[in-house]
Amino acid sequence: MRVEQIAVFLENKSGRLAEITATLASENINIRALSVADTADFGILRLIVDNVEKAKSILKENGFTVGITNVIAVEVVDKTGGLAGVLKTIEEEQLNVEYMYAFVNKSGENAVLIFRFDDMDKAIEALQRTGYTILSSEQICAL
């Protein structure tokens, strides 16, 4: 199962992130997870939202450069070593993590790890085979 993620390229200047989040909020688009990576000149905002197509359209209309990529959402128990267990599986399969980020809804319950791998199909197979739950977009939005 893959989750669609929006990637927004933005100038590395004050107010751009606030502008994006306000634009999405004004259209009742809920951000479920996000990550920001930056360089000296630009940033990449990665978002998982409850309405991908609407978010993409609205952001483009407002002059943002937007792309959609697929990621994998892995549910793990929120306890010491949860991430280490997933990464052990990935290492054993000799997969490369291109990037990742995570979120927790309520401490002590489950965490969700968002991954982009060099071989997404192999990663899904390996994680499911070792007992990890892969979440859909709908499941993430329901959290």
Image (cartoon, grey):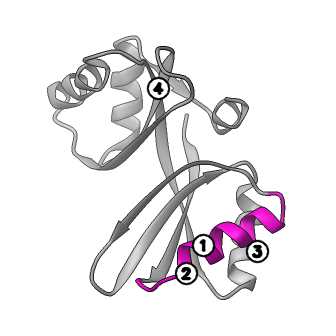
Q: Residues within 10 Å of mark 1 (few under 14, many from 20)?
A: few
Q: Residue at x 34, y 34 (%)?
A: 122
Earlier-in-chain disc, 4 versus 1: 1
Place of residue 88 in the rendered image (x, y in percent of width and height, measured from the top left): 19, 23
Q: Residues within 10 Å of mark 2 (few under 14, many from 20)?
A: few
Give me the C-alpha separation between circle 4 and circle 2.
30 Å
Q: Quadrant of the N terminus?
A: top right
Magenta residue check for 118: no
Q: Observer-nearest residue: 104 or 66?
A: 104
Give me the C-alpha separation between circle 3 and circle 2.
18 Å
Q: Residues within 10 Å of mark 3 (few under 14, many from 20)?
A: some
Q: Which residue is denoted by mark 2 in the rendering?
A: 15
Q: Which residue is denoted by mark 3 in the rendering?
A: 58
Place of residue 133 in the rendered image (x, y in percent of width and height, measured from the top left): 49, 19
Which label is found at residue 18?
A: 1
CB atoms of marks 1 and 2 within 8 Å: yes
CB atoms of marks 3 and 1 within 8 Å: no
Q: Which residues are magenta?
A: 12-28
Which label is found at residue 111?
A: 4
Residue 93 seen in the figure: yes
Instruction: Kindly identify the amino acid type of the residue bearing the numbered disc 3.
Output: Ile
Place of residue 125 in the rendered image (x, y in percent of width and height, measured from the top left): 39, 25
Magenta residue check for 24: yes
Give me the C-alpha separation between circle 3 and circle 1.
15 Å
Earlier-in-chain disc, 3 versus 1: 1
Query: Which-is-in-front pick, marks 3 and 1?
Result: 1
Query: Which-is-in-front pick, marks 4 and 2?
Result: 2
Q: In the picture, residue 43 is in which quadrant?
A: bottom left
Residue 116 seen in the figure: no
